[in-house]
Image (cartoon, coloured by chain):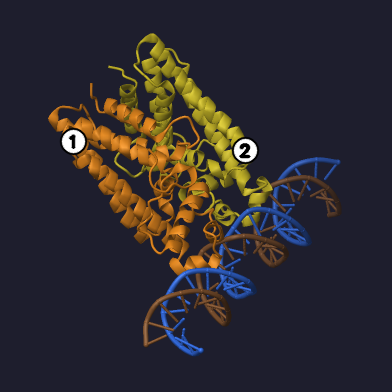
Chain colours: A orange, B yellow, C brown, D blue
Amino acid sequence: MSTAQETTGGEVEPWEEVTPDAARRLLVAAVEAFAERGYHATTTRDIAGRAGMSPAALYIHYKTKEELLHRISRIGHDRALDILRTAARREGSATERLADAVSSFVRWHAGRRTTARVVQYELDALGPEARAEIVALRRQVDAEVRGIIEDGVASGEFDVPDVKGTTLAVLSLCIDVARWFDVNGPRTPEEVGALYADLVLRMVGVR
Amino acid sequence: MSTAQETTGGEVEPWEEVTPDAARRLLVAAVEAFAERGYHATTTRDIAGRAGMSPAALYIHYKTKEELLHRISRIGHDRALDILRTAARREGSATERLADAVSSFVRWHAGRRTTARVVQYELDALGPEARAEIVALRRQVDAEVRGIIEDGVASGEFDVPDVKGTTLAVLSLCIDVARWFDVNGPRTPEEVGALYADLVLRMVGVR
DNA sequence: GGCTACGCTAAGCGCTCGCTCACCGTCGGC
DNA sequence: GCCGACGGTGAGCGAGCGCTTAGCGTAGCC
């Protein structure tokens, strides 16, 4: 069942949209470094070193260290939003769509934990304009999940007194997976996804 | 309904165990700075400045910047564990104790969000020995919550197929409050605590 | 009133940071 | 075979970092 190219930790790296090759290698190195130590504790020398280049090479492909974070955050949020949209807009009951959304969203946060960690926890390191752009994407993420829950309430599948609060809690639960998930731990991303889908269905009152 | 001394954001600051006064002022300043910008992005000059002192004054009371983080983390974890222990060991059904534990734990993460943020998200900035000490406290936190859930399963109050996984999810949900809670937002810590207690009872299958 | 102890400051050390610049090897087009 | 474009390097700049040190004001004790 193995597919495509794999890298550290068995994660597939789909940064194919980043070209040329050297720019992608730098970006992947930055994702790893930011995830491990955080944006502010990561040096440009460390990033360049992981990519097998001299410190100056970074500035051929990126204007600043912050631009690297911005690009990573943008691509990561696009991917996260894409995952939720796919689940939200497929055919099926609200129950099925919510379970699908949560399990795939969680699988992403667990399986691609390094990326998710940077995407979810390094937002504050962005400047005002870049952050505003990302915050707009996050509002769309919220809207997709809220939409499914509203559908389930309308159809009578769900029993949810506080739709906005429950949406927040569901997303919060999924996002925090990126903080605690351990690639070498006892659970696979698929197992966590299934467990969380079940827990979330309970939260919305599916009997 | 206002009580005691208040500081920025309406939070009560109970750092009374930290003496002398200058050391406490520095520590409170560090909590605010670490919460706002993160440990690595905070300078010792910034901390001292917030406390109304020169940069060198910090080193009269603390050996290093890391010692400040260690003290904050230690006191914060002690407080968090204390909150959970109190709820876990009171009289009452597992349902009542779990609801109490979650609502008070969440109230702390929301109401004292700056402290909680440092405690929960700056762990990696500690050195190996300090981190090991804190990790031991976190295992006790986990054990308290798992204990209540196990009690509920044993008494037939709860229906939980995966106790360890559910414990993890419950704690994760509560902890993540420190990431998103907004003091100027529409919800009070009490409201979030009540909402989350309800959601968690649903997660453990209380009808 | 002299003396010590203590809390604090001004100045600055050594270092590392993000980033720049002058230069170089390679490779396709003519 | 020459040339420009491109992707890369080595060296290093100015700034800001964590932290130190010499010295100063004040309060308490004899």
Based on the displayed image, in which of its 4 quarters is residue B25 positioned?
top right
In the displayed structure, does residue D21 sit left or right of residue B54?
Answer: right
In the displayed structure, does residue B158 sit left or right of residue B83?
Answer: left
Residue B93 is at least partly visible in this image: no
Percent coordinates x, y for residue D23 in the rendering:
77, 62
Which three-letter amino acid code belongs to the residue tagged 1?
Answer: Glu
Q: Which residue is mark 1?
A: A150
Based on the displayed image, in which of its 4 quarters is residue A127 positioned?
bottom left
Residue A31 is at least partly visible in this image: yes
Percent coordinates x, y for residue A5 in the rendering:
42, 48
The kind of secondary structure element at disc 2 is: helix
The number of discs equals 2
Measure how far apart labels 2 and 1 are at the Cα level.
46 Å
Report the quarter where the C terminus of chain A lies: top left
The kind of secondary structure element at disc 1 is: helix
| Nearer-the-camera pick, A85 or D15 | A85
* Label annotation for residue B130: 2
Percent coordinates x, y for residue C5 in the rendering:
78, 45
Which three-letter amino acid code belongs to the residue tagged 2?
Answer: Ala
* Label annotation for residue B21: none
Percent coordinates x, y for residue B56 in the rendering:
65, 55
| Nearer-the-camera pick, A59 or B106 | A59
Mark 1 burial class by Cα count in 10 Å: few <14, some 14-19, many 20+: some
Seen from this angle, which residue lies furthest top?
B155
Seen from this angle, which residue lies furthest left?
A155
| Nearer-the-camera pick, A33 or B153 | A33
Vertical comparison of A29 with B119: above or below:
below
Determine the residue positioned at 34% across, 45% down: B184
